[in-house]
Image (cartoon, rainbow, N blue to C red):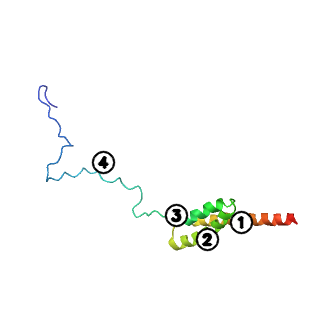
Amino acid sequence: MTEPGQPVSEPADPWQSVPSGATPPPPAPGAPGYGYPPPYYYPGYQVRRTNGLAIAALVCGICGFLYFIPAILGVVFGIIGVRQTKRDGTDGRGMAIAGIVTGSVWLALLLVIIIAFAASSN
């Protein structure tokens, strides 16, 4: 505390420029606004990729009712996707299998429709 009537000293300006040739002092530990934010993941953790063909197989398998061409693509992409996930270690094996199953179901339904139509036309 200062006595009444005494001049008050101003605190040093933290934003003043550093003279040329001088290095600025290091920031205080834990000071906000310096460097990168702390990582939100565990050290050594690697994000795994999802296989693109597995995603394509699932989408094509689900949309197999559209002229049944995506069902064929879903089965083909699914088989290739399962092989790639096994070889590369990428994620998406379940999606590839789901693409194979849904594409096969749509193709089986198409086969039943063709047989029913052929039987009814006789």
Q: Which residue is mark 4?
A: 33
Q: Which residue is mark 3?
A: 50
Kindly check if marks 4 and 1 are in contact, taking CB atoms under 8 A apart as contact: no
Q: CA distance from mark 2 to mark 3?
A: 15 Å
Q: Earlier in the sequence, mark 4 or mark 3?
A: 4
Q: Earlier in the sequence, mark 2 or mark 3?
A: 3
Q: Amino acid at mark 4?
A: Gly
Q: Earlier in the sequence, mark 4 or mark 2?
A: 4
Instruction: Tell me where residue 11 sits by quadrant.
Output: top left
Alpha-carbon neighbours of circle 4 within 10 Å: few (<14), some, or many (≥20)?
few
Tell whether 37 sits left or right of 57. Answer: left
Instruction: Tell me where residue 70 sits by quadrant.
Output: bottom right
Q: Amino acid at mark 1?
A: Leu
Kindly check if marks 2 and 3 are in contact, taking CB atoms under 8 A apart as contact: no
Q: Given this view, does label 1 or label 3 mark the residue nearer the observer?
A: 1
Q: Earlier in the sequence, mark 1 or mark 3?
A: 3
Q: Which quarter of the rendering shows the N terminus? A: top left
Alpha-carbon neighbours of circle 2 within 10 Å: few (<14), some, or many (≥20)?
some
Q: Amino acid at mark 3?
A: Thr
Q: Which residue is mark 1?
A: 107
Q: Given this view, does label 4 or label 2 mark the residue nearer the observer?
A: 2
Q: Given this view, does label 4 or label 1 mark the residue nearer the observer?
A: 1
Residue in view at x 78 percent, y 63 percent: 113
Q: CA distance from mark 1 to mark 2?
A: 15 Å
Kindly check if marks 4 and 3 are in contact, taking CB atoms under 8 A apart as contact: no
Alpha-carbon neighbours of circle 1 within 10 Å: few (<14), some, or many (≥20)?
many
- Residue 42: x, y in percent? 41, 60
Q: CA distance from mark 4 to mark 3?
A: 34 Å
Q: Which residue is mark 2?
A: 79
Relative to 10, residue 46 above or below: below
Tell whether 99 sits left or right of 27. Answer: right
